Image (cartoon, rainbow, N blue to C red):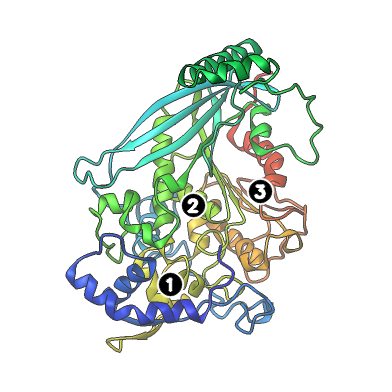
Amino acid sequence: MNLGLGRGMALAATLVLAAGASQAQQGTPAHPTADQDRAAMMARLNIAELIPGPSGDEKAPNHANYDPAVANPYPNLPDPLVTNAGKKVTTAADWANVRRPEIVEAYEREVLGHVPANAPRIDWKVVASDPERVGGKAVIARQVIGHADNSAYPAIDVNIKMMLVTPANAKGPVPILIMFGGANWPAPSTPRPDDYARIDAAMKADLAARDPSLAAVFAAHPGFHLVEAPPFRFPQAAVGDPPSQEQLINAGWGYALLDPTSVQADNGEGLTQGVIGLANHGQYRKPDDWGALRAWAWGASRAFDFLATDPAVDAKRIGVEGVSRYGKAALITAAFDQRFATVLVGSSGKGGATLLRRNFGEAVASLGTGEYYWMAGNFLKYNAARMTNGSKLLNAGDLPVDSHELIALVAPRPVFLSYGIPEKGDANWLDHQGSFMAGVAAGPVYELLGAKDLGVGHDYHTAKMPGVNVGLLDNPLAWRQHDGGHTDLPNMKYFIAWANKQLGYQPAQ
């Protein structure tokens, strides 16, 4: 999340518009900057200027709105249970066959972008395996690489990085939580002390062979080691909650660390690279092409493809998790891929669980002038300040969909919406209230499909957000605001217990 966007970013986009338009006509530069890429998209859409995004600094002159009294300029949300033709949806079949596809299509066209038909095949391979310990429990960690078929455009090479960690002594397949973030070894095993001694001796012998005078140096200092085993240290008592991965392993789950930036870079200049650039053969996107958020979600779906074939994994109980921008990606993953059993959405803000129509903290303009590359190009239309062809200006109230419908796309599967508190770093910018309202407004779809919602009614205008550390955790649609910061760690133990109940999973004792 970028809290300092302002007029400078919008001005830069405007200044390079002419250059971008020319490049759009002449072809894509080999390595366009983010400004060039955005300007080329603006030219495609006849946008002359974008509305500047507000600052996240509450003391700045152009700070975002934090006054609840004016936070809802477009108070009425699109009804998720009314079709484009104005027909009320009253059956699960109508939802599945008519209304759900309409919402998916609108989200893909106007907000997140379509996945192209030529999205590459991913070939997965386990490249290394290591017996490790997580939270005192024996695990098997496997480094897995997913290579994208680039035979149609060899200039771009995409290799998706994932680390799969499962309990070593599990009596059967275990649930897996795909977690967006770095795909590193959790606790790499180390050689035995005698192996360290052999390594040290081999290194000294090699150096002495290269420089014979070093033999005398090593002989004069027999206690000197080039490499030696680390000293034993007693385990330190944990302060606060153990890491999420430890909690999962101790609860009988496994997890997969998925690096989203190995699918698609987290910046605008990367749009002609990564999986998006590979599908486009290095050219600029079309207005309804996928952005980074949709690409990350697509990457998680390809990870699911691999995990579902692994005998250590319970394919019916694979969930997905992320925080902040990766919280957005986690929700999008579960919304568009109905194979995922559950999702933990951490502090996701605009583009995730927070209502786009809300004027509180992060704005549509923030996404349009900052992290525009997360979204489809068409999303810029709702942030235009001036058009080159004089066409009507659109705003957030004109969006055909909003985040309550993104949540509803997961229904009736379990969704856990998680936030912290501003005082600890989970900034007001994220609009916690806007996410709670979206959860409430998604309730009617859960109810239609025979699942229970948040349990606070369906009036998102008046529903009162629970207090800090007061969870709504009895139903498939869940909410909890913890008293920590920009993380979902304090909610992980609640998520695990809730997910076990929702998914009917009892860890083997």
Of discs 1 and 3, which sits in the foreground? Answer: 3
Of discs 2 and 1, which sits in the foreground? Answer: 2
* Residue 382 percent location from the top left of the image: 42, 76
Within-10-Å neighbours for mark 2: few <14, some 14–19, many 20+: many
Q: Secondary structure at mark 2?
A: helix
Residue placed at 32% from the left, 53% from the top? Answer: 273
Residue highlighted by disc 2: 329
Q: Earlier in the sequence, mark 2 or mark 1?
A: 2
Residue highlighted by disc 1: 399
Residue placed at 60% from the left, 82% from the top? Answer: 62
- Total of numbered circles in the picture? 3
Q: Secondary structure at mark 1?
A: loop
Residue highlighted by disc 3: 488
* Residue 485 percent location from the top left of the image: 71, 55
Q: Earlier in the sequence, mark 3 or mark 2?
A: 2
Q: Secondary structure at mark 3?
A: loop
Of residues 34 and 417, which is closer to you in this image? 34
Left or right: 430, with 212 as reference point: right
Disc 1 to disc 3, C-alpha distance: 29 Å
Q: Amino acid at mark 3?
A: Asp
Q: Is residue 56 above or below residue 273?
A: below
In the figure, residue 500 lies in which quadrant?
A: top right
Q: Amino acid at mark 1?
A: Leu
Q: Earlier in the sequence, mark 1 or mark 3?
A: 1
In the figure, residue 285 lies in which quadrant?
A: bottom left
* Residue 60 percent location from the top left of the image: 65, 80
Within-10-Å neighbours for mark 1: few <14, some 14–19, many 20+: some
